[in-house]
């Protein structure tokens, strides 16, 4: 097990800013409703660091680890090439244990104490949603590379100014999956199965809207909770409803248990999944995974571009215990997203010309960059919060499990046009 | 400096430090604290409020809840929903955030009527899990796992409540104020009849009931207050985060809250603050351990539990006591010591010669076993009435029926002319029936003085609000109760032991204390269950004097005893039971001459009793 | 009908897991009037250690035996180190907290060393299900009720027929009196926790091939097993077996006909109501409160 984490995680103290000011008389008088006189958060120079709050412990720790591998490797390369604006860029990682309140604690720590120039996000959608207000209040740009909830970027009233994402967006993913399912379903009976998390529940209204737009009537909606071990009841209901294609919205463990339940009752519908399924799923269920399709932004198991190959080689060199083959890239899309996200941010910093949060935010809208996942031209569009997502549906790719590997669908027998 | 003064000083320092904390940067010329540190302190203060509530439950009432996070979450969701969906103002939504969890807490107290200990804990766990499941899956109301976002910023009198360095941190002071209020309520409750009743009920439920404590009612109150604090904190949290979802209120959070109570020192005043502060700080520092941080957390807990099983405050207090302990000579006084103020030891005694207690056709069965069979008995006021018989004759069972602990299968008991079938022990205690127990049932971890004060419970008229606000009537009654308790300690010769924990007393002193405690009720009828057991010869003589003295001053005494010479010395009348039936009733001389009594003792009695009877 | 068959079959299998974990709690409680509150971790170790042993090249069966033995030793060590020192007074709750602390450490260390991803536990019995019309079950899952019966009968015989078992009953009946007749109550309690460890680890190991091994697999099962034991009246082994199986089946019918999302809410509410109706548990004996 590697221990590179400790160095990066060690808290960095913000450089002290001496401000001599006499203790105001309001101190004692203004007990109930005191107004502070601290320096305004705007127009202050920030430190060359990227703060990240994600799950270091807990059930999603593996996603956090994969994210760290991609980010630290990318940063190493960037710093080896002289850093950004002449200074090396640091990564500070804080654990949110999957709890939104902790994520906000961490955001405050990153934005106020560490005074980082930008914050990155982890896997969980609620943790990102809880940050909307504090980020805006601190004026701290945030870049997500996993959490796909629509509400992370599309805020009520179009008020998003600070949150960017280089990842999938559920509203677009649902549309994509429904279209893929519709194209493949023979009976036209499509069902939606989702986990009882913010990610799963949050996709339900999106999928229903997507189904309506595509004239699909969902033949079933079923859910299960994290930790559930048997989904026989749900699967029996779907089978009895004549469903032949399942749109799945869940992660590895529960999906594996669901596959087991399908296998028990001898039902094998076509499954088209959001990107919760990884190689760990295939390891768990063995041959049952064959042919299951997964939407994603990137696949490392297919032919790689020189840039992608270089990225993989670097990760393999830096984390030899964890990354031996491309199959060890357990969050393939998220790792590519993170790789692109950090490079887009670096480009923006260069355009901004200073470690300044507001200028960085403004520069994000001016970045054009060719990444692993897509050609971002431009990465983000100002005044259009829908486009504070950098990865457009055109970049979504269908992948499928074949011989225990998640492959680009063209490289498997399950590609279309057969 | 006395411990109490030290406590107040510490509290004042604590309040000042917290009040000044946001301004530290201005004092030392640093950019510190930032909004991050402010937020941490606010969150810690909010959690401390929950922990204070839980301390009332765990530390005082002895009820272990592992569902407290759910009540915290209930408050948060009530506040969030009311301000988001119903447009309630901050103050209005906070009021409901306290009230609704408090009512839920009262409902949760119901199981304590029937189950205790680990069973109750399991019920609270189940409650917490059910609550989280509902939050997560009732999507239309709670937003499901995505939670409720974009709560409106709270305002008071048009002032926006903020918690950041850059804008304003007036919310910080609102939370601090709530914390200080919570600390005050904890103190005021603990140092009143409510706190004493809770501790008494947790240390000996039976004795508490016999002293007029309505155990169900005080536990319901404790649950409600505890839940109210959890709800208050929940509401404060919702208005700080402006986002709530179930993940803050899981079973793990309940465990953390309980650990904070134990870590600080359950049942202490400062424990919740220290426990919360320590654990909260530890969580931040443990971040450096990366994926091993939960391991470090577990290790830290284990270490604390091993090194300081009574928590930080408990262990420090024990240490302080050991360091400061002076071998002081404590005098055991003579007893009974009929000093001034004891003339009215029995409040409004019945007129002499009246029937104080009357049993008719009284039968008590346990399954197939008949412990008391068709007993008829009369006890006249101002007399000492002995109840004797061989082992298993049903004496204690009869006493338990009279004092309300057992419900008679058939028949009737009248006390002071009132039919009291099915009356709860605490009701009887309030009518004026006091009792002692065969195996002394003291409140071992309370002081000798507090033990007696529990007995004064029924004399209080001031209610909960008066107690918390320390209104004049409460002060008056508390002062009177203390004077009376000290007088009674003097009466049994234990004045010098007032501050000692009851469990540390020698056995004979424990008997004295139990009697003093029963007398604090100012009973009209005193039931003594083998009061002489384990006492020395001299002590028994004193006891005889005491019982006689009480009867002479108008108290009626029913005495279950084996010591025949004591019975002869003290009793006006004797009833003899055998196999649950009355076989003789009359004066001492009459009973002694009764052939059935002789047969019962010598024919069927145990060896020990034969010797006693022969003595 | 197919559905009903399916619910009965999977209910029986998952119920057997609850019952075996519940029996573990029963064995601990009878001996010590205290339990390992995070007993779910022993269940988890049964499965996880088997995977680890297989990783080392040990074949499945010896790996399983090693894992159960190691888990049992861990369970006994928890008794010695974390329960006994905190269970000296009546009504002590220290053991609850210390076992939670040690459970946190075990789970955290497992996550760090074993990984947070679940791992498959290969078993030839979990590859092809037996189909009954439209219902089906893995042979592996049928092992669970079989194991439950063996374990329950074995436990009964152990308590009645062996010296050690009798000594354990004596300790359960009256610890002090058992000490007076020369029984080392502490040693008996240690062994009891070890036996409970075997039960828990066995359950985890047997269900592992179906649900995969992971560091968090035990948390909920442990709690449910404890609740089942309490509902049954924790001092009645047969009651625990019946309640465990019934709860497993009831869960499946709740999922089938009421709600899958609210299964636990409904199930736990049901348990609380039962406990209020039968404060001593469904099969517990009523105690007369002595005054």
Image (cartoon, coloured by chain):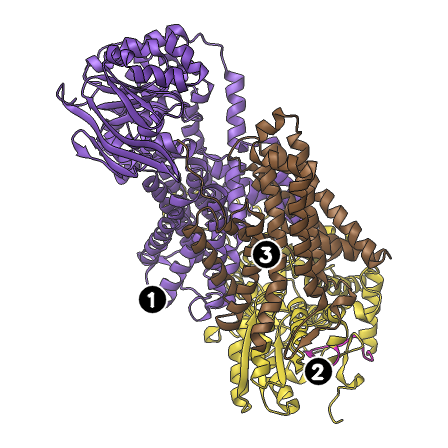
Chain colours: A yellow, B purple, C brown
Toward the viewer: A161 or C160?
C160
The answer to whether dots 3 and 2 both sit on one chain is: no
The residue labelled by disc 2 is A398
Say which quadrant the C terminus of chain C sits in. top left
Which percent across, then down, holds residue A58?
64, 57
User: In the rendered view, would you say A346 is above or below C104?
Assistant: below
Label annotation for residue B282: none
- Viewer-side label of 3, 2: 3
Q: Is residue A204 magenta?
A: no
Residue B290 in the figure: left or right of residue B75? right
Label annotation for residue C220: 3
- Residue drawn at x 45%, y 33% is B268
Mark 2 burial class by Cα count in 10 Å: few <14, some 14-19, many 20+: many
Which percent across, then down, holds residue B157?
30, 56
Residue A330 in the figure: left or right of residue C24? right
Q: What secondary structure characterizes most of the magenta part?
A: loop
Tell me the SS state at disc 1.
loop
The answer to which image quadrant residue C186 occupies is top right
Asked whether residue A109 is in view, the answer is yes
Mark 1 burial class by Cα count in 10 Å: few <14, some 14-19, many 20+: few
Tell me the SS state at disc 3.
helix
The residue labelled by disc 1 is B86
Which segment is the magenta one? A290-304
Toward the viewer: B246 or B516?
B516
Which percent across, then down, holds residue A1?
79, 54
């Amino acid at each position: 097990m590697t221990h590179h984490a400790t160095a990066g995680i060690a808290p960095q103290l913000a450089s002290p800013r001496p401000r001599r000011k006499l203790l105001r008389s309001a101190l004692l008088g203004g007990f109930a409703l005191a107004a502070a006189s601290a320096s305004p958060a705007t127009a202050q120079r920030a430190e060359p660091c990227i703060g990240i709050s994600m799950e270091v412990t807990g059930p999603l720790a593996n996603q956090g680890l994969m994210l760290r591998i991609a980010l630290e490797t990318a940063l190493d390369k960037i710093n080896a090439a002289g850093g950004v604006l002449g200074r090396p860029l640091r990564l500070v990682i804080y654990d949110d244990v999957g709890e939104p309140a902790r994520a906000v604690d961490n955001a405050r720590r990153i934005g106020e104490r560490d005074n980082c120039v930008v914050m990155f996000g982890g896997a969980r959608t609620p943790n990102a949603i809880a940050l909307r207000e504090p980020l805006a209040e601190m004026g701290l740009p945030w870049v997500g590379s996993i959490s796909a909830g629509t509400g992370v970027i599309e805020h009520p009233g179009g008020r998003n100014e600070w949150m960017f994402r280089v990842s999938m967006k559920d509203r677009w993913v649902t549309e994509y999956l429904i279209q893929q399912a519709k194209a493949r379903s023979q009976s036209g009976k499509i069902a939606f199965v989702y986990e009882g998390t913010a990610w799963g529940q949050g996709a339900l209204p999106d999928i229903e809207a997507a189904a309506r737009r595509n004239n699909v009537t969902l033949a079933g909606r079923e859910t299960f909770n994290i930790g559930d071990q048997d989904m026989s009841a749900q699967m029996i209901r779907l089978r009895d409803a004549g469903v032949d294609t399942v749109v799945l919205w869940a992660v590895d463990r529960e999906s594996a248990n669901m596959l087991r339940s399908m296998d028990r009752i001898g039902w094998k519908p076509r499954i088209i999944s959001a990107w919760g399924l990884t190689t760990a799923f295939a390891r768990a269920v063995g041959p049952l995974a064959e042919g299951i399709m997964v939407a994603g932004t990137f696949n490392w198991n297919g032919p790689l571009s020189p840039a992608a190959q270089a990225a993989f080689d670097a990760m393999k060199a830096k984390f030899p215990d964890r990354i031996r083959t491309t199959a060890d890239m357990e969050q393939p899309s998220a790792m590519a997203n993170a790789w692109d996200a950090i490079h887009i941010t670096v480009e923006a910093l260069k355009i901004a010309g200073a470690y300044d949060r507001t200028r960085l935010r403004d520069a994000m809208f001016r970045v054009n960059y060719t990444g692993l996942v897509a050609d971002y031209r431009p990465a983000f569009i100002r005044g259009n919060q829908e486009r504070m997502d950098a990865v457009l549906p055109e970049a979504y790719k269908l992948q499928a499990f074949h011989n225990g590997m998640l492959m680009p669908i063209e490289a498997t027998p399950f590609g279309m046009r057969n | 400096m006395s411990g109490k003064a030290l406590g107040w000083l510490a509290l004042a320092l604590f309040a000042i430090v917290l009040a000044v904390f946001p301004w530290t940067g201005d004092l030392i010329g640093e950019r510190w604290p930032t909004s991050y540190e402010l937020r941490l302190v606010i969150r810690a203060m909010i959690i401390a409020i929950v922990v204070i509530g839980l301390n009332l439950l765990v530390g005082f009432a002895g009820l272990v809840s592992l569902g407290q996070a759910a009540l915290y979450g209930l408050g948060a969701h009530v506040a969030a929903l009311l301000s988001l969906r119903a447009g309630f103002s901050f103050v209005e939504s906070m009021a409901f955030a306290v009230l609704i969890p408090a009512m839920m807490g009262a409902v949760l107290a119901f199981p304590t009527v029937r189950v205790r200990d680990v069973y109750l804990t399991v019920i609270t766990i189940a409650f917490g899990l059910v609550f989280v499941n509902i939050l997560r899956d009732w999507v239309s109301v709670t937003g499901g796992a995505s939670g409720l976002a974009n709560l409106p910023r709270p305002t008071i009198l048009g002032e926006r409540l903020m918690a950041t360095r850059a804008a304003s941190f007036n919310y910080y002071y609102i939370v601090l104020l709530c914390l200080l209020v919570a600390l005050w309520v904890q103190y005021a409750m603990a140092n009143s009849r409510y706190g004493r009743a809770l501790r008494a009920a947790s240390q000996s439920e039976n004795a508490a009931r016999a002293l007029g404590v309505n155990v169900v009612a005080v536990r319901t109150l404790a649950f409600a207050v505890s839940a109210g604090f959890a709800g208050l904190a929940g509401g404060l949290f919702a208005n700080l985060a402006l986002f709530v979802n179930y993940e803050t209120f899981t079973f793990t959070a309940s465990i953390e809250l309980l650990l904070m109570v134990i870590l600080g020192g359950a049942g202490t005043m400062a424990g919740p603050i220290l426990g919360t502060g320590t654990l909260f700080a530890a969580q931040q520092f443990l971040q450096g351990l990366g994926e091993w941080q939960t391991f470090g957390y577990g290790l830290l807990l284990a270490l604390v539990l091993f090194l300081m099983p009574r928590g930080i405050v408990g262990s420090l207090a024990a240490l302080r006591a050991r360091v400061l302990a002076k071998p002081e000579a404590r005098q055991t006084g003579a007893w009974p010591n009929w000093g001034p103020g004891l003339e009215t030891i029995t409040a409004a005694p019945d007129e002499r010669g009246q029937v104080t207690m009357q049993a008719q056709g009284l039968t008590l069965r346990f399954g197939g076993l008949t412990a008391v069979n068709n007993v008829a008995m009369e006890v006249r006021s101002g007399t000492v009435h002995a109840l004797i018989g061989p082992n298993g004759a049903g004496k204690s069972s009869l006493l338990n029926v009279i004092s309300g602990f057992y419900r008679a299968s058939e028949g009737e008991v009248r006390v002071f002319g009132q039919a009291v079938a099915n009356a709860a022990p605490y009701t009887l205690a309030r009518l004026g029936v006091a009792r002692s127990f065969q195996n002394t049932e003291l409140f071992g971890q309370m002081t000798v003085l507090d033990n007696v004060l529990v007995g004064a419970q029924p004399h209080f008229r001031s209610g909960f609000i008066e107690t918390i606000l320390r209104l004049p009537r409460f002060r008056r009654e508390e002062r009177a109760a203390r004077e009376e308790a000290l007088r009674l300690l003097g009466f049994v010769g234990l004045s010098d032991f007032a501050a000692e924990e009851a469990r540390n007393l020698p056995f004979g002193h424990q008997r004295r204390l139990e009697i003093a405690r029963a007398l604090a009720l100012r009973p009209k009828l005193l039931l003594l269950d083998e009061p002489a057991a384990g006492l020395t010869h001299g002590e028994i003589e004193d006891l005889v004097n005491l019982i006689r003295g009480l009867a002479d001053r108008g108290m009626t005494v029913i005495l279950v005893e084996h010591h025949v010479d004591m019975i002869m010395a003290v009793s006006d009348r004797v009833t003899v039971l055998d196999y649950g039936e009355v076989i003789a009733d009359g004066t001492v001389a009459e009973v002694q001459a009764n052939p059935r009594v002789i047969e019962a003792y010598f024919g069927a009695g145990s060896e020990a009793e034969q010797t006693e009877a022969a003595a | 009908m197919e559905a009903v068959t399916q619910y009965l079959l999977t209910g029986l299998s998952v119920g057997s897991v609850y019952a075996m974990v519940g029996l573990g709690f029963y064995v601990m409680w009878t001996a010590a009037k205290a339990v390992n509150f995070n007993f779910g971790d022993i269940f988890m170790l049964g499965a996880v250690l088997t995977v680890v042993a297989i990783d080392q090249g040990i074949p499945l069966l010896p790996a399983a035996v090693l894992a159960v033995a190691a888990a049992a030793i861990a369970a006994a060590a928890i008794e010695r180190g974390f329960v006994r020192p905190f269970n000296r007074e009546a009504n002590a709750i220290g053991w609850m907290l210390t076992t939670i602390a040690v459970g946190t450490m075990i789970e955290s260390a497992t996550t760090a060393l074993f990984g947070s991803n679940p791992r498959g536990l290969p078993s030839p019995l979990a590859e092809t299900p037996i189909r009954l019309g439209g219902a089906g079950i893995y042979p592996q899952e049928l092992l669970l009720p079989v194991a439950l019966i063996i374990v329950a009968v074995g436990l009964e015989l152990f308590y009645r027929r062996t010296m050690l078992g009798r000594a354990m009953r004596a300790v359960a009946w009256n610890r002090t009196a058992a000490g007076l007749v020369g029984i080392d109550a502490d040693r008996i309690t240690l062994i009891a926790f070890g036996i409970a460890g075997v039960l828990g680890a066995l359950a985890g190991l047997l269900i592992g091939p179906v649900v995969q091994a992971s560091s968090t697999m035990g948390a909920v099962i442990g709690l449910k097993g404890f609740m089942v034991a309490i509902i049954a009246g924790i001092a009645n082994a047969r009651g625990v077996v019946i309640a465990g199986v019934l709860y497993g089946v009831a869960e499946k019918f709740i999922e089938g006909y009421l709600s899958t999302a609210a299964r636990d809410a409904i199930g736990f509410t049901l348990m609380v109501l039962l406990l209020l109706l039968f404060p001593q548990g469904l099969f517990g004996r009523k105690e007369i409160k002595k005054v």
